[in-house]
Image: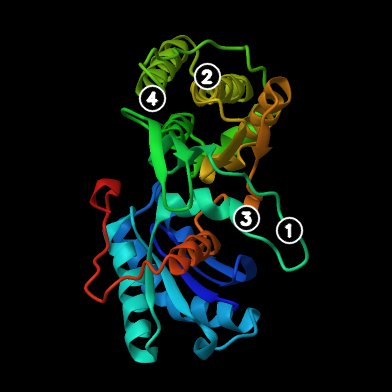
Amino acid sequence: MDITILGIESSCDDTSAAVLRNNVLLSNVIASQQVHVKYGGVIPELASRAHQQNIIPVIDTALKEAAVTIDDIDAIAFTRGPGLLGSLLVGVSFAKGLSLAKDIPLVEVNHLQGHILSHFIDMPDRQLPHPEFPFLCLLVSGGHTQIVRVESPEKMEIVGTTIDDAAGEAFDKCAKVMGLPYPGGPVIDKLAKEGNPSGFKFAKPHVADFNYSFSGLKTSFLYSLRDHVAEDPDFIEKNKADLCASLQHTIISILMDKLVKAAKHYKIKDIAIAGGVSANSGLRNAIEEEGRKRGWRTFLPEFKFTTDNAAMIAMAGYFRYQDNRFSTLDVAPAARSEDL
């Protein structure tokens, strides 16, 4: 029997709704918020207000694009967390209201697990490559950088994580110092293609096990800029491409070193990446190159599944629906992963 899931995602600054039939995506609608660009980061209060404005038209559009009605929906999957509490509250509250009004079961989803399980989505006209369990996933999303050992859709173990800043935060903070627009990661990626990745040397951390650290790299980058700018006020503008290329090369090297060690340790050759930074061209190339060298099967998400989206929430919800893991109406949003 076919299972049709409505997914709702509102963890940060994108309001998204998607419809999934089994694991085939019928629609995926995203309303982005441009209001945060001028502030150089997401303003939580503005984000939650925009979600309130966007959520009804986004869900309505997703249903229409999927050619279904709300009465065709078997379950509502929603992001419970982690994320901005005010933003999550909008999505969770709407999902509960819709569930109560239409007597549709609720399925809560961990946003980070949604990113990982996006690798199991298929399109109406084609089947995408799926990893086999167990696999390793390098998750680089927002304030999270993790290596996750995925045994099944419901059994995941974080084997490595950042002890301070995440990779995405390092990109954004360093970009801000160089006067680049927010979000900084895509801009650095674009400029890096024009620069020399060996132009500058920045500190690389020495952290135990499979854990990450990016605060030392960020500090090294900032002090290097300060010293150079003191001698030449136009230093950043003259060397922007090389700075971006060197910074990106260093971050990717840090990410890949621990991923390679984890793959060797667990003897796993199905390797995936997920999250916003998985759209970075340098990281995608590095994963594929390492895969050819080490005999990995590598899985890179389509670009539309790298950012926050409801398709991945619906996918995770589909797996939980199959296991009868339903939520009650007293469920509350959780800003932190440890509270889920």
Q: Distance of mark 2 from mark 3, alpha carbons?
A: 27 Å
If you read the primary sequence from the N terminus, does the residue marked by circle 2 or circle 1 appear first? 1
Q: Whole-percent x and y of residue 197?
A: 63, 17
**Badge 2 amino acid:** Asp
Residue at point 45%, 77% (across, down) = 75
If you read the primary sequence from the N terminus, does the residue marked by circle 4 or circle 1 appear first? 1
Q: Whole-percent x and y of residue 154?
A: 42, 53
Q: Distance of mark 4 from mark 1, alpha carbons?
A: 34 Å
If you read the primary sequence from the N terminus, does the residue marked by circle 3 or circle 4 appear first? 4
Residue at which label 2 appears: 257
Quarter of the rendering containing residue 199:
top right
Q: Residues within 10 Å of mark 4 (few under 14, many from 20)?
A: many
Contact between labelled residues 3 and 2, with CB atoms less than 8 Å apart: no
Q: Distance of mark 3 from mark 4, alpha carbons?
A: 28 Å
Residue at which label 1 appears: 127
Q: Looking at the image, which is closer to me, 64 or 178? A: 64
Residue at which label 4 appears: 211
